[in-house]
Image: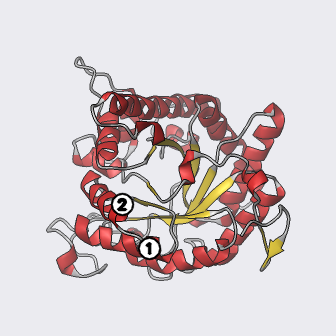
């Protein structure tokens, strides 16, 4: 059902085909998003005890021209993913200051922008290399999603400034860099609060109005409690947060193309997807779903930090998430088990399915395979 712009159904302002404007390659049918990058780089030896080494790897040059970030992107493309996400999740000013990569806010903004540009370059290089391979005749359909991450430490909603306008300048800087680099989609991911999403929308609106340039499609994905999947990490109701995003995107005439959930357990994603599918029914807004692959849930890991522990971290074998037979000895969900969740999400209404922390090319190969064979 196509609904004129501005018409409201169940309190949600719906997006019309004219507002979505760009019926791009990104949602022509179901799409497979890539899997995790940070943990996969750590698994390949790119680690300094944090994820900083992973984002700095965007700038690595080796004598033979190989780059670890490009290699991971390439493996996801080879696995059958339609979308690769730029490796810029921790390329934010606060992390630059905390890690000593800058000494003042202006320097932190510059360094974050450099790393974001490098992340886009690596994604573009990986797609270009994929195009040169024999049999990669679907390469023109590959999409590069520019990562728009939380500005503060993810999951901890209490660390997010309470005033939306306080978030706008830094989000505007990130978005401006991604727009200048020419990504196909803007992916705001692992969002813990509705105000972060609203700040992203306002930043994007101001950038568009200032330049009169076209804005690529926007995907907004929240992270929810693992044991209370109807609520964001901030305890805000998921349905209310997504409704507010759809409504504000409509009022600002922004090309919101999908809302979703990520960086939570697969079972939590399973509970959240039907909520989003119901909210977006009859609109041009799709549903995005990609979960973590750790036996230890994020909620368990956060609780261990509060209790002074946390040495195992996410992925430790001792977690309580799911059936033990679905996990390997290191606490990672097996690819076949993850693919079963992915099919269930697609059946429940997800139009974009991928993997988050702990997922690997092996997981996404299984997901891509079963979704291409599966008809919901």
Residue at 36% in and 64% down: 371
Residue 372 got which mark? Answer: 2
- Please tell me how crowded label 2 is: few (under 14), some (14-19), or many (20+) other residues with Cα within 10 Å: few
Helix, strand or loop under label 2: helix
Residue 376 got which mark? Answer: 1
Residue most extreme to the left: 329
- The vertical placement of 62 against 256, above or below, is above
User: Quadrant location of the C terminus?
Assistant: bottom left
Q: Give the number of callouts.
A: 2
- Please tell me how crowded label 1 is: few (under 14), some (14-19), or many (20+) other residues with Cα within 10 Å: few
Question: Whole-percent x and y of residue 27?
Answer: 56, 54
In which quarter of the view is residue 313 placed? bottom left
In which quarter of the view is residue 372 placed? bottom left
In this orientation, does residue 241 appear? no
Question: Whole-percent x and y of residue 349?
Answer: 52, 72
Helix, strand or loop under label 1: loop
- Answer whether labels 1 and 2 touch (C-beta < 8 Å): no
User: Quadrant location of the N terminus?
Assistant: bottom right
In this orientation, does residue 30 appear? yes
Colouring used for the render: secondary structure
- The vertical placement of 249 against 131, above or below, is below
Residue 123 got which mark? Answer: none
- The vertical placement of 268 against 151, above or below, is below
Residue most extreme to the top: 63
Question: Whole-percent x and y of residue 300?
Answer: 37, 75
Q: Is residue 25 rendered to the left or right of residue 5?
A: left
Residue at 76% in and 38% down: 207
Residue at 30% in and 69% down: 338
Question: Whole-percent x and y of residue 193?
Answer: 63, 65
* Structural distance between the alpha carbons of marks 1 and 2: 11 Å
């Amino acid at each position: 059902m196509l609904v004129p712009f501005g018409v409201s159904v169940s309190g949600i302002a719906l997006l019309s085909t004219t507002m979505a404007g760009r019926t791009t390659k990104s949602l022509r049918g179901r799409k497979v998003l890539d899997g995790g990058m940070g943990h996969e780089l750590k698994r390949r030896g790119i680690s300094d005890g944090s994820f900083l080494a992973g984002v700095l790897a965007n700038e690595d040059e080796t004598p033979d021209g190989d780059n670890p970030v490009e290699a991971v992107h390439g493996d996801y493309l080879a696995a059958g993913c339609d979308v690769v996400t730029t490796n810029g999740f921790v390329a934010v000013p606060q992390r630059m200051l905390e890690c000593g990569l800058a000494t003042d806010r202006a320097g932190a903004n510059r360094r974050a922008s450099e790393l974001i540009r490098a992340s886009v370059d690596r994604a573009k290089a990986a797609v270009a290399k994929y195009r040169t391979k024999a049999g990669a005749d679907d390469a023109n359909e590959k999409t590069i999603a520019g990562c728009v991450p939380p500005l503060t430490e993810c999951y901890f909603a209490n660390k997010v400034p309470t005033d939306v306008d306080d978030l706008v300048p830094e989000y505007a800087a990130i978005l401006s860099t991604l727009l200048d680099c020419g990504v196909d989609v803007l992916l705001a991911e692992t969002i813990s609060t509705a105000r972060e999403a609203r700040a992203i929308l306002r930043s994007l609106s101001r950038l568009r109005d200032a330049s009169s340039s076209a804005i690529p499609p926007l995907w907004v994905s929240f992270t929810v409690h693992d044991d209370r999947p109807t609520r964001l990490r901030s305890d805000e109701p998921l349905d209310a947060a997504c409704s507010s995003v759809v409504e504000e995107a409509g009022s600002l005439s922004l090309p919101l193309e999908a809302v979703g959930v990520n960086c939570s357990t697969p079972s939590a994603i399973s509970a959240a997807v039907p909520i989003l599918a119901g909210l977006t029914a009859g609109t041009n807004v799709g549903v995005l779903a990609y979960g973590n692959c750790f036996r230890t849930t994020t909620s368990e890991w956060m609780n261990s930090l509060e209790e002074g522990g946390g040495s195992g971290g996410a992925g430790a074998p001792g977690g309580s998430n799911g059936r033990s037979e679905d996990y390997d000895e290191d606490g990672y969900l097996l690819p076949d088990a993850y693919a079963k969740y992915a099919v269930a999400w697609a059946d429940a209404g997800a139009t974009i399915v991928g993997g988050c922390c702990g997922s690997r090319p092996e997981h996404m190969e299984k997901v891509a395979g079963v979704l291409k064979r599966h008809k919901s």
